Amino acid sequence: MFAYFLKRLAFVLPIALAVSALCFSLVYLAPGDPLSAVLPSDASQETIEQVKADYGLDRPIPVQYVIWLGKALQGDLGKSISNGRAVAAEIGNAIGNSLMLAVLAASLGFTLGALLGIVAGYAHGSWLDRLLSTVAIAGVSVPHYWLGIVLVAVFSVKLNMLPAMGNGPGGPWVWSWEHFSYLILPAVTLSAIPAGIVMRSVRALVADTLKSEFVTGLVAKGMGHATVFRHLARNIAPTALAVVGVQLGYLMAGSILVETVFAWPGTGLLLNNAIQQRDIPLLQGTILVLAMFFVLLNLIVDMLQPLFDPRIRRS
Amino acid sequence: MNPISRRAQCAQSACSTPVLSQSTARSRWLSGARRVALGAMLAGALGGAMSAAQAAGTLRVAMSLSDIPLPNGQTDQGAEGMRFMGYTVFEALVAYDLSSASKPVTLIPGLATGWEVDAKDKLRWVFKLRPGVKFHDGSAFNAQAVVWNLDKILNDKAEQYDAKQAAQGRGRIPTVKSYKVLDDLSVEIVTSEVNALLPFQMAWIVMSSPAQWNAVGKSWDAFLAKASGTGPWKLQTYVPRERAVLTRNAEYWDKARVPKLDSMVLLPVADASARVAALRSGQVDWIETPPPDAMDSLKGAGFTISSNVYPHVWPWHFSRVEGSPWNDIRVRKAANLAIDREGMKALLGGMMVSAKGMVPPNSPWFGKPAFEVKYDVAAAKALMAQAGYSKEKPLKLKAIISPSGGGQMQPVLMNELIQQNLAEIGIQVEFDVRDWNALLANWRAGVKDASTKGAVATNSSYFSQDPFSALIRHVDSSLMPPKGTNWGYYSDPEMDKLFDGIRTEFNPAAQTAIVAKAHERFVNEALFLFVAHDVAPRAMAKKVKGFVQAQNWFQDFSGVTVE
């Protein structure tokens, strides 16, 4: 078991290094000038050269990478070109907002998806299964930003029940309805895809497992529905957990459009702004942190799976 | 007022809504969560919000920016940054007269009461400063502060030198060579060449408080949260990427411009549909640049749309290197006569003014050009026939355009109409669509740069706030890349002579007359494809009163009230 953890952990280092090199070099392939964010459009060549020197962008890219990596290893991701703030602090502020949104969306998505998936799995092949599967496909297929705009049109503009954008009325976050209300529409929007994916995965797992010999055996032994379901749940949990882990990662990194539509100041909006402004340090730092978050999440899921599935422990 | 807007307005402003401590709030939340279902919580909260006090005189603005402009002085985020942060909290020696919607904006004294070039030495200027002005921190504004602020952006050895502010400000005053304190209220500025446009350029350079910078530990990062300028608004709250709250500076030196509002909340909402939704749901009172397709619905829902022409032009910048089809004046004039600008205006929901030159026709710089830019397809076809082209034997060319970008209005829609119009007279256009930043990078590099890839026109909208930005930088033969942004490598000794006249004429009226002559030549030679001037639309709730939209990129919010 310990060897298994060590093995999983060992994979993280080369992945992190590869991700850092990739994210550093990829952003240089994008068209446009990274200094556009700080310079007036008609800045003279002399001003451009001076600003390049000020920001260290006049050095060769491999040299910039080595300097950046050295600092990144010490937790210093540099400073944003566009606003001069520390990238680590910018990401730190944004990641809290995104995490809050992602956890709520994942909880909503997982709960709804698991419930509907179990129902559809038990009712496999029936009209109810087909109806729920259609809902799940709609959830997976509907464009995030479109759903967000529709929800805003209904609940903010028409009914005036929930705020249309922003992450709160100002001041630090407190657990009050006033703050929580800002979370609802983006979280519901963001939960549509994981709900659909989890539902489809759970449905397939339940339907397959119900056909297993051990379930037939349990039923033949006269076990009640609750007992059979308990066995079923333990069998589908590891796979469902992996799906949820991956989805949470996607929610953290893939909420660019939703955070933009709702002006939610999380990592998605940060990434969007960094791309728009060619803010290379911010872009590199955000991609690196999100990629590492994804890797870490997968590591946690990998480590949790043996707790649910003794077969992995034994292997 | 609806519950959400009432709650949001109160909470976002400096009003007296009680703020729960975090622990108290959390315990209430937890106990509440145990007791009630979400539906009941919703109903209760909405009811509570109904009774919340409403702040008087707070304007909530959704800017089209993705971040709050830096409150350091020489702010970032272009003209919108200067509009909401640069000229609200801070001020320059030279200001703009933004008091009227009906007349073009002119320069007026700001923190300087006057300026004069030395009659014997045209490189030497003296700026006389306004007495009795104080920064928000209470320290005095004086000549030492002006020199300190110039060092902030021009002297990289100075302890207050700030690369961020230098990037924004240095290029605005390229001829400033030296400066010194003459006395407490007089500053001398020496330029490297004769430059009668210095007052226009100095209008960009705003003053931050040296005393405050020292008080916060000589750190520009620390200054951001406790910014201090001399402007009519004080910075109360600055939360990067979320909000800034500005409050009235009751001690402002110009009593006529002391804000009527208590406070102004600035929110960065880059997505246009999110801004519209925020306005319609009552979460904000004012939005910048509503999208054209939302205009009718906003008007129908009772919102006010404010707009006015301003120094902005949306042209095609022509290549004038050897082999360019635009070297034939008949082709240039034909293209200008082929554009259905009124049709374009309808496409944009009325939100443009047809361009007849680089500046709007009511500008004192417009002059009286002999060539009238209008929609006349027959005349355009005749000119094309003289040049040897027709629909059957078309001229084929490539133009660089962008899908979006600051000041670019609706570039794809507008360019597609131009493509259709030009096809009518025998000009077949192929578009090279590039990201806005990539387009700008090529614009700086010039048409001879390899990145142009055979294009002979580029569509970049331009700021035309002063004679240099409106005319000189585009076609002065001494400003070909990399020295400047004469993208098309245009060279005309006559025009250069006029530009020299503008730079060396210190009498404002005489200078204006020369600018008008240069503009007449610009139009008569049809140097660009003149298409549109933006009208800076903004939408606001009916309760917002007293806003006078000046013909400018910058606006004065002092007279605004919220009923």
Image (cartoon, coloured by chain):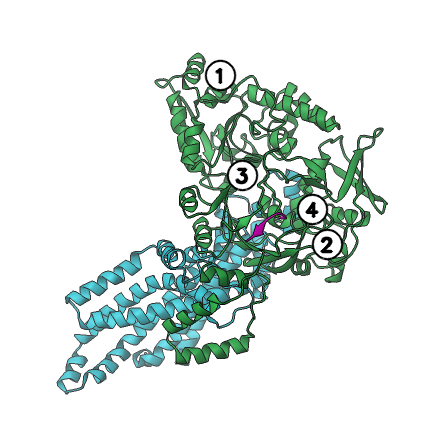
Chain colours: A cyan, B green
Q: Nearer the viewer, mark 4 or mark 1?
A: 4
Examine the rendered structure and indicate whether residue A65 appears above or below residue B539.
Answer: below
Determine whether, in the image, residue B301 is placed left or right of residue A218: right
- Disc 4 residue type? Ala
As measured in the structure, the alpha-carbon distance from the residue carrying label 4 to the one carrying label 1 is 52 Å
Labels 4 and 2 share a subunit: yes
Mark sitting earlier along the chain (4/2): 2
The residue at which mark 1 appears reads as B330
Q: Which mark is residue B440?
A: 3
- Judging from the image, what secondary structure is the residue with disc 3 in? helix
The percent coordinates of residue A80 (x first, y second) are 58, 55
Residue B17, image x and y in percent?
56, 67
Residue drawn at the location 79% of the way across and 34% of the way down: B116
Q: Quick one: B61 or A197, which is closer to the camera?
A: B61
Residue A154 visible from this viewpoint: yes
Mark 4 vs mark 3, CA separation in Å: 40 Å
Badge 4 is on which residue? Answer: B256
**Relative to B204, B125 lies left or right:** right
The residue beneath circle 2 is B251
Task: For label 4, count other residues whose C-alpha is less than 10 Å away and answer few (under 14), some (14-19) or many (20+).
Answer: few
Q: CA distance from mark 2 to mark 1?
A: 59 Å
Q: Residue furthest left?
A: A220
Give the extent of the magenta segment: B558-563
Whichever of callouts 4 and 1 sits on the residue coming sooner in the sequence is 4
Q: Secondary structure at mark 2?
A: loop
Question: Mark 3: few, some, or many residues within 10 Å (few <14, many ≥20)?
Answer: many
Judging from the image, mark 2 belongs to the subunit labelled B
From the viewer's side, name the closer residue of A243 and B172.
Answer: B172
In front: mark 4 or mark 2? 4
The quarter of the rendered structure image containing the C terminus of chain A is bottom left
Q: Quarter-wise, where is residue B342 in the image?
A: top left
Q: Residues within 10 Å of mark 1 (few under 14, many from 20)?
A: many
